[in-house]
Image: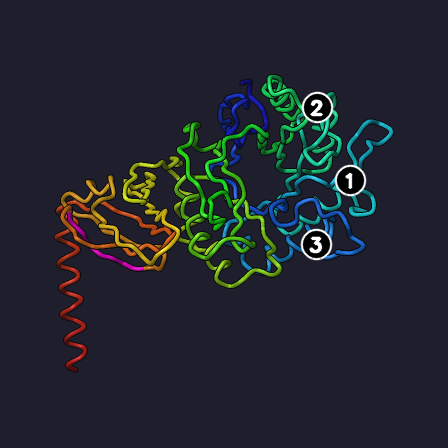
Amino acid sequence: MEQTAVLLLVVFSLSCPAAEALDNGLALTPTMGWLHWERFMCNINCDKDPDNCISEKLYMQMADVMVKEGWKDAGYEYVCIDDCWPSHDRDAKGRLQADPRRFPGGIKKLADYVHSKGLKLGIYGDVGKNTCAGYPGSLGYYEVDAQTFADWGVDLLKFDGCYMNWTLLGEGYVNMSKALNKTGKSILYSCDDEHKEYLFRYNSLPSQTGLPLIKTSSFPVAGPGGWNDPDMLVIGNFGLSHDQQESQMALWAIMAAPLLMSNDLRNICPRSKKLLQNKLIIDISQDSLGKQGSLTGKFDSFEIWERPLSEKRLAAAVLNKQEIGGPRGFVIRAIPGWKMCDPKCNVTQILPEYKEMGVQTPKSNIVLSVNPSGTALLTITPLSSDFTEMYKLRWEDLSVKQKHATIL
């Protein structure tokens, strides 16, 4: 691919062409932000539901909350519009235009508002004749639409794949990529289509519990500049237990997946907010090594997912696939990457609760307690024999000082 200003963010489709990450400073770590679809869908009835319909008011309010409630500080930076934003008709020059009743100020004004908050604006389009909800698609208008998005100041384009012959999707995505490049503006480009193989699908088990069904990714190539996207985080939304929410957050971090929330940040429960803003989980997601994790073990209704981290560390997630019963035990040394604990390692448990497990050995007998549909998330740091001895001496010295202080 020629040198360009646009980056293909998502290569998670059976038909999407492979993309080469560009050295343009975009998406060096998985994208973080908010997207409307899973929570607000195509609600366009602003007369009956003015606070939740797809309108400029909704995105302005989300931008305000992202700044006020610590989301921006936690790393979430994109406010993204999904389907159902446009007018059903293009303007006299063939350009897309926002629905005038729901977006009276237009997208340019909305982008300026979002930018004034130190955030970025994402928008939605489609490679075919129409969007998935039946609004105008970009087929035959790739250059016009790309320039329109650039003129508006859009920072991310989610490009769907409805109403298009699947054999032509790859060509269509490339054509829009070229059109975006031609504008000269850096725009994060998210390739998304109806034939994608999701890693996770919700509400698909017989009990309708919403426990994710996990499949090994067929698209392992990911790293700084481009990330596989198993779709939106629905944490804080309806339908998932808290254990299932923890599982989604942990596994998205392990897979180096974009953290794009789809919920109502204006009314989110404190426990879900704390999970989404958990710095230790976000640190795994945004790790500078940029390696995507994978499924490394599967037995007795447990799955083990592991991700290499910078400084030779490892993140591991142990998922309990059972839906009923109580917490089950998992012997920690059964994690395939536990071999890095020879001679010793330091272990930190992040989920379901933070716990420093200290220095461990290859023969450690710690048993993790994992709830049904829940996940235990750990980081493992290998220790050299010299470091272990130094750690031991410092711990003993600290213990002596604490004992002495108690006597005094």
User: For this view, does 150 lie left or right of residue 205?
Assistant: right
Magenta-drawn stretch, dominant element (helix, strand or loop): strand
Residue 24: image location, x then y, percent: 53, 30
Residue annotated with mark 1: 98
Residue annotated with mark 3: 52
Q: From the viewer's perspective, is residue 165 above or below residue 309?
A: above
Q: How is the image coloured?
A: rainbow
Sequence order check, earlier mark of 3 and 2: 3
Image quarter in which the C terminus is found: bottom left
Residue 20 versus residue 372: which sits nearer the camera?
372
Measured in 3D between alpha carbons, the distance from the residue under mark 3 to the one under mark 2, in whole angstroms, is 31 Å
Which amino acid type corresponds to the residue marked 1 in the rendered image? Ala
Q: From the viewer's perspective, is residue 67 above or below residue 291?
A: below
Q: Quadrant of residue 126?
A: top right
Residue annotated with mark 2: 142
Sequence order check, earlier mark of 1 and 2: 1
Q: Residue at x 51, y 58 (%)?
A: 273
Measured in 3D between alpha carbons, the distance from the residue under mark 3 to the one under mark 1, in whole angstroms, is 17 Å
Which amino acid type corresponds to the residue marked 2 in the rendered image? Tyr
Which amino acid type corresponds to the residue marked 3 in the rendered image? Asn
Q: Which residues are magenta?
A: 355-361
